[in-house]
Image (cartoon, grey):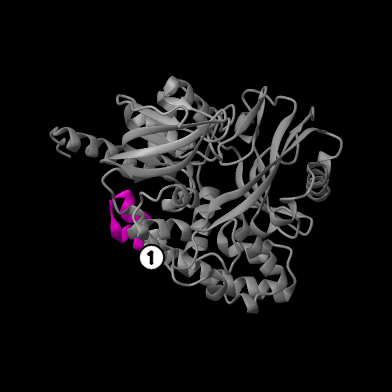
Amino acid sequence: MAGETETVRDVVVVGGGVAGLVTAWELRDRDVVVLEASDRFGGRLKSSPRDPYWLNFGAHLFPPAESTTGRLVAQLGLETAPFRGTPYAIAMRGRVIPAMPEWRYPLQMPLSPAARLSLIRSGLKLVGAERQAEKERKALGGASPEAERLRILRFMGDESFADFIDEGSLHPEVDALFRAVANRLTGTMRQLSAGGFVTHYAGANKGAKSTWLTGLVGGSGRFPAALAEALGARVQSGAEVTSVTEESGLVRVAFTRGGEQTLLLARHVVLATTAGTAARIAPVLAPETRSALEAVQYGPYVVVSLLTGERRAMPWDDLYAVLVVGKRFNILMNQANLLRDPARGREPGGSLMLYAGGEFAQPFLGQPDEQVVQTFLDDVTTIFPDLRGIVREAVVQRWHEGVPYISPGRHRLQEALERRQARVSLAGDYFGYPSIEESALSAVHAARHARATLRAAAGEPQPVS
């Protein structure tokens, strides 16, 4: 085979998203290489600078400074900033309703009397479930991330949200509201577990009441770009892995790069790809693990990122995220919000991200960009008419495998996903509730397992934990 080499690497990481890059960072004292199929690193963390703003195209919420991701961001010399003003609002029937105590929504939202009663009934069920989830969380005390992850997956994990909320009984106006929330997670109410929906609902309420939400100044893509730059020659783009198999006590990684077939031998491999890709390329995995990976569900999303050229304050300046009900996209996110510091004065222009997930995304996956942009602009200008005439640039991004959502029964896959193998580890945001932090945590655990297997193979003593 052209390009074959007998060099044995300590660790080969397959996938150059956040999980793969963090894994390599944790193992940078070893002989490690990252193989990324595309021509860029970062996976769904993607942004493009537009000084002083940026266009974001995927994941962009960063956890607090004390988190695994937060500490790494600081190590890399990057800066996060909190979103300002109102973190969360709902746009419905011509009104934008800012975050408020849960009991006030049925009174403040523009609903018919029948819809208001329907929202009260369903809202009480949601609040009760949220309180039960919080009770269970507190009962775990200072549990490990793995235990907390499993708690989230198990909570109301065998029932769909559609069954829990009795979807058929919802008033159409309330159904539209819950559809917008569910598709934020890229699934339908039937496809999501009740616990998965409640976890998101509770997180949105927490975000509306606190300042823990942060964004990366300059765009989320700066995080993987900084990691890749720091790792230097350890990372290779355009390297598509086709198979991961065992060979004489080592792992054989076959890939193509520049049209050339190549292989590497490794003492350990970390699969930091989407779940389905890991199952497809790695017969080295245990059969039950491959089956579990194949069962992980993903939904698509489509975003239109807008660069705007206004020269005055705008009605959305004080908002970060707006849940949009009854339109063809379901979330507006104001990426420039974290720069709106009154002490600095308001810079001209701005950046918005319009998001359509799950069912909302499906019609746009095959449409021309121009048609997608026009549809989104037609809808968003009915909410914020001030956008008319100030859009300077609109860029479409489609993610066919967007977010791994928590489906009914998902918790039953966890044992097989977390089962360790001697020469292979898994990393990715599909291990729990998907987030940048979940990717980073899974990477840290995969790196620790890889390091332990390398020590064991070399007869080195294991560190005392």
**Which residue is at a point 52% across and 26% down the rendered structure image?**
225
Instruction: Indicate whether residue 342 is drawn in magenta.
Output: no
Work out whether residue 73 or residue 135 is closer to the camera in this orientation and state it.
Answer: 73
How busy is the neighbourhood of tag 1: few (under 14 within 10 Å), some, or many (20 plus)? some
In this rendering, the answer to whether 45 lies above or below 74 is: below
Seen in the picture, residue 239 relative to 195 is either above or below; the reply is above
Secondary structure type for disc 1: helix
The residue lying toward the viewer, choosing from 103 and 276, is 276
Tell me the chief SS of the magenta region. Answer: helix
Q: Where is residue 383 shown, x and y percent of the image?
A: 78, 50
Q: How many marks?
A: 1
Query: x%, y% of residue 68?
Result: 38, 37
x, y percentage for residue 93? 78, 59
Q: Is residue 148 magenta?
A: yes
Q: Report which residue position mark 1 lands on.
A: 412
Give the residues drawn in magenta, as a range: 136-149
Residue 332 visible to the viewer: yes
Q: Amino acid at mark 1?
A: Arg
- In the picture, the quarter occupied by the C terminus is top left
Q: Nearer the viewer, residue 407 or 365?
A: 365
The image quadrant that residue 183 belongs to is: bottom right
